[in-house]
Amino acid sequence: MINILFVCLGNICRSPMAEFVMKDLIEKKNLTKEFYIASAATSAEETGNPVHHGTRNKLRELGISTAGKYAVQIKKSDYGKYDYILGMEQRNIAGIMRIVGGDPKGKIKRLLDYSLNPRDIADPWFTGDFEETYHDVKEGCEALLASILKSEKFI
Ligand code: 4NP
């Protein structure tokens, strides 16, 4: 079982988008049983709130539902629970490190560090551009999945 946690600032825009795009990718590869995938926030600002309508609408266009997802904050114990902890931007990495207290196993990276063009994913809460967010998230999730499927963690 591979455990993946996607993390952003609020857990209402980018990280839930990554969670449900990744679940869709692995479902299409018939690998759902091999993975546990979730998302969380570094801040407690949006705790308990549903997915932002910008993310919901973009994913609905693609036939992907976010039903049942409400924002949660990452906990220190999540470091032991997950194999991959993926922030959306550098600021999230600092927020994750503050909560989990360090990264001795090298689990914490930006999602797009797995892509050929490592970079931050801009916050659509501020940009309003959920289309751009989706393209970045999809690129990152595809690159992450390809990397996992090549790694020795995937048995
Ligand atoms: P997210 O977007 O980190 O992609 O979920 C944000 C959501 C809420 C806030 C900031 C970013 N906020 O300031 O409440």
Image (tube, rainbow, N blue to C red):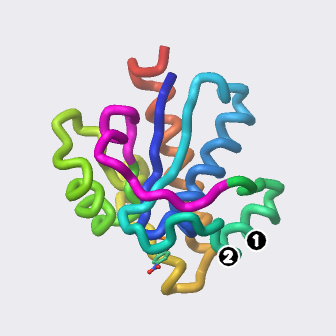
Tell me the residue that label 2 is attached to. Answer: 54
On screen, 58 above or below 73?
below
Residue drawn at the location 27% of the way across and 62% of the way down: 95
Horizontal and vertical percent position of residue 115 = 43, 51
Q: Main secondary structure of the magenta part?
A: loop
- Quarter assignment of residue 8: bottom left
Q: Magenta stretch: residue 38 in it?
A: no
Residue 19 in sight here:
yes
Residue drawn at the location 52% of the way across and 85% of the way down: 127
Q: Residues within 10 Å of mark 2 (few under 14, many from 20)?
A: many
Between residue 139 and residue 77, name the one nearer to us: 77
Horizontal and vertical percent position of residue 111 = 42, 53
On screen, 124 above or below 153?
below
**Can you name the residue that lies furthest to the front here?**
48
Ligand 1 has an atom within 8 Å of the beta carbon of the residue at disc 1: no
Residue 116 in sight here:
no
Question: Magenta part of the protein: which range?
Answer: 69-85
Q: Magenta stretch: residue 70 in it?
A: yes
Answer with left or right where residue 4 lies relative to residue 64.
Answer: left
Tell me the residue that label 1 is attached to. Answer: 57
Q: Say what secondary structure mark 2 lies in.
A: helix
Between residue 115 and residue 53, name the one nearer to us: 53
CB of mark 1 within 8 Å of CB of mark 2? yes
Between residue 58 and residue 73, name the one nearer to us: 73
Residue drawn at the location 47% of the way across and 20% of the way down: 154
